[in-house]
Image (cartoon, rainbow, N blue to C red):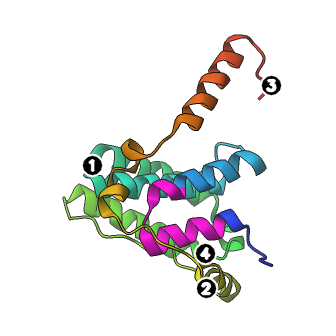
Amino acid sequence: MYSYPVPYLAFLAHFHIDRDYFECHELLEEYWKKIDGTRDSVWVGFIQCAVFLYHYRRGNKAGALRMAQKSISCLIRRQEALRELGVDPEHFLLLIEQAADDVKADVPFEPIEIPIADPQLQNELKQFTAAFEPESNEQFLLNKHKLRDRTDVLDARTAAIALKKAGKVTR
């Protein structure tokens, strides 16, 4: 039905509509691990951008700036991949840099938009979001990392650590 990956469309929906940057991170992290898993993937750059904005909105200046720099560094190297994903890379990088400058200048949080350059992506995102139900609780969005049940994530992390200690990790 879609030419773009559904997790990517979901990421864009959350990024642009309800600004649920925590969910953006969760969606793409799961997808990235399934299809790629490399540390310098374009997906990592998107994830880092979402985490940057999550920290910025929460007032975590140091965390925001650290993630903005990581996102910029990754996405500079992945501009062709951004183009292939329907994004204007130069404009997107400029928006992240400007938002990072705003953090440094103590400017209150303002969301950014990922500049979509491909009309096909715009159409698919419009179709995808027709049934999208945004999260409207701003306090939940602001503190989602504290309020969300992450038992499954923590259990998986504990299991991975145990495997690593046992020398059974092949990655």
Please identify the quadrant where the C terminus is shown: top right
Rendered image: mark on residue 44: none
Residue 134, visible in the rendered structure: yes
For disc 3, the marked residue is: 170
- Disc 4 is placed on an element classified as loop
Position of residue 139 relative to residue 15, above or below, is above
At label 4, counting other C-alpha atoms closer than 10 Å, the crowd grade (few under 14, some 14-19, many 20 or more) is some
At label 3, counting other C-alpha atoms closer than 10 Å, the crowd grade (few under 14, some 14-19, many 20 or more) is few
Closer to us: 168 or 131: 131
For disc 4, the marked residue is: 87
Which mark lies nearer to you, 3 or 4? 3
Compare marks 3 and 2 and give the one earlier in the sequence.
2
Marks 4 and 2 sit apart, C-alpha to C-alpha, by 15 Å
Compare marks 1 and 2 and give the one earlier in the sequence.
1
- Disc 2 is placed on an element classified as helix
The amino acid on which the numbered mark 3 sits, given as a three-letter code, is Thr
Compare marks 4 and 1 and give the one earlier in the sequence.
1
Predominant SS of the magenta segment: helix
* Label pair 4/1, CB-CB below 8 angstroms: no
* Label pair 3/2, CB-CB below 8 angstroms: no
Residue 99 location in percent, x, y? 34, 65
Region in magenta = 8-24
| Magenta-span inclusion, residue 13 | yes
Marks 1 and 2 sit apart, C-alpha to C-alpha, by 33 Å
Residue under the point 44% across and 46% down: 148
For disc 1, the marked residue is: 61
